[in-house]
Image (cartoon, rainbow, N blue to C red):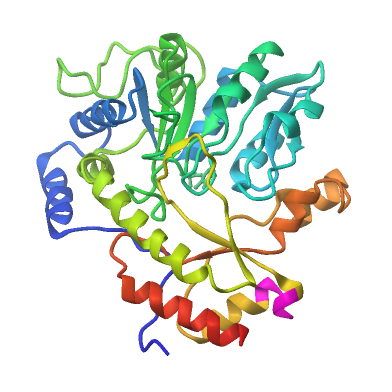
């Protein structure tokens, strides 16, 4: 058994990263400024999208998006139920109704077939999630949304480094990335709103900072422009330079991080293949580059004779951390009680919600760590 605890995720922060944060603190400009601008520029170059707005979180980006699209009471937004709760919370907080599309059983992602029955005259947007570092079938989903005359926005929180049919996701259309500590790069907390629509980019820039006509940082005056006026009421969701410098440094290492994630995932796939109770996700054919954000498996609970929660507890007893991405939103207390969606409505979502488990995966892990996880799983299922 492992002597030390293996967390399911850990950010890669170097001494140089720490020094760079220190330099910002000493520079005299610590909120949105030159480092945020440089991060936005290099991030956009990496993804291949024309406009990027750095924010306090991806959740903030989702809030601004719903505001910019004018989504409110009487409107519906189509999204999966297996997603991070923030999207659904914000739809509800905007006074709109989430409409859950079921998922493909083995990729955990919505498909044009599962989304099709969700459209109604009230549909205002479709928000699919690229899951675990693989890509949703964004080409077909976007075409479908446009046929219904509604925008599609990609939740790309898991998808930094993910390519779909040879292009980075988020290169076209509108997408939101996250830099929460478990994501492929981190700024502690942070997000990036990416879009190829210049008007949308301007609107988001404005809404993220009080609705002012110019940014907090004016490059000419090297400070806040005193001429800025409120063009519409906005929020306070800007990223600080203290954390932007981390993003700026990490975006240049993301390929290196993801290569390591991919190598570890290959080990998992090889070594878990012989364990019948463990079912990894399948990789969509048109994911031409996988970001390996998470290594998710499903426990065959019938064969294993134990629940997923018991399995996670057994791993913890053996010094191995796990994650759960995600418990279906419609099965959580508030949504169960307020929406009354019965079990059986979203069969593939529910089947996975009861069986998924994320195994440790982060760039500073070793093959030996992977071997220790596989050994522990074998012992638990023996
Ligand atoms: C992490 C995550 C988010 C939210 O990101 P934050 O930056 O924490 O707000 C949204 N969607 C998915 C799928 C995520 O995994």
For residue 6, say whether it is visible.
no
Residue 94 location, quadrant: top right
The mark tally for this picture is: 0
Residue 227 location, quadrant: top left
Viewer-closest of 131 and 188: 131
Is 29 above or below relative to 82? above
For residue 112, say whether it is visible.
yes
Viewer-closest of 297 and 165: 165
Residue 18 location, quadrant: bottom left
**Image x and y of residue 379, in percent:** 54, 87
Q: Residue at x 42, y 51 (%)?
A: 292
Q: Residue at x 57, y 31 (%)?
A: 137
Tell me if residue 379 is in the magenta stretch.
Answer: no
Quadrant housing the N terminus: bottom left
Q: Is residue 330 left or right of residue 188?
A: right
**Image x and y of residue 318, in percent:** 49, 86
Which residue range is magenta in the image?
A: 303-309
Q: Residue at x 73, y 76 (%)?
A: 303
**Image x and y of residue 95, in percent:** 73, 30
Q: Is residue 303 left or right of residue 9?
A: right
């Amino acid at each position: 058994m492992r002597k030390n605890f293996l967390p399911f995720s850990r950010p890669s922060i170097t001494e140089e990263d720490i020094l760079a944060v220190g330099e910002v603190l000493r520079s005299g400009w610590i909120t949105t400024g030159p480092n945020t601008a440089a991060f936005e520029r290099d991030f956009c170059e990496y993804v291949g999208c024309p406009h990027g707005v750095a924010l306090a979180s991806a959740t903030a980006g989702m809030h601004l998006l719903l505001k910019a699209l004018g989504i409110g009471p009487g409107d519906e937004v189509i999204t999966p139920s297996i997603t991070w709760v923030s999207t659904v919370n914000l739809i509800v907080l905007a006074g709109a109704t989430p409409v859950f599309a079921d998922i493909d059983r083995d990729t955990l992602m919505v498909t044009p077939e599962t989304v099709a029955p969700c459209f109604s005259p009230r549909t205002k947007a479709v928000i699919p999630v690229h899951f675990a570092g693989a890509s949703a079938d964004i080409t077909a989903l976007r075409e479908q949304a446009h046929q219904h005359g509604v925008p599609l926005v990609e939740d790309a929180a898991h998808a930094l480094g993910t390519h779909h049919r040879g292009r980075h996701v988020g290169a076209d259309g509108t997408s939101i990335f996250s830099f929460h500590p478990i994501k492929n790069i981190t700024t502690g907390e942070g997000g990036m709103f990416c879009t190829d629509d210049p008007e949308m980019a301007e609107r988001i820039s404005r809404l993220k900072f009080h609705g002012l006509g110019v940014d907090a940082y004016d490059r000419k005056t090297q400070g806040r422009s005193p001429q800025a006026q409120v063009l519409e009421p906005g929020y306070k969701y800007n990223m600080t330079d203290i954390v932007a410098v981390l993003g700026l440094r990490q975006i240049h290492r993301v390929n290196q991080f993801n290569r390591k994630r991919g190598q570890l995932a290959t080990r998992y796939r090889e070594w878990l293949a012989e364990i019948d109770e463990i079912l990894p996700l399948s990789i969509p054919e048109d994911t031409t580059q996988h970001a390996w954000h998470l290594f998710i498996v499903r426990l065959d609970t019938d064969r294993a004779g134990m629940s997923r929660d018991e399995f996670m507890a057994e791993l913890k007893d053996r010094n191995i951390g796990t994650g759960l991405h995600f418990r279906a939103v419609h099965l959580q207390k508030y949504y169960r009680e307020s929406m009354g969606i019965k079990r059986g409505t979203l069969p593939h979502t529910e089947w996975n919600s009861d069986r998924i488990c994320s195994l440790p995966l982060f760039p500073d892990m070793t093959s030996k760590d992977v071997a220790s996880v596989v050994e522990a799983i074998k012992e638990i299922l023996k």
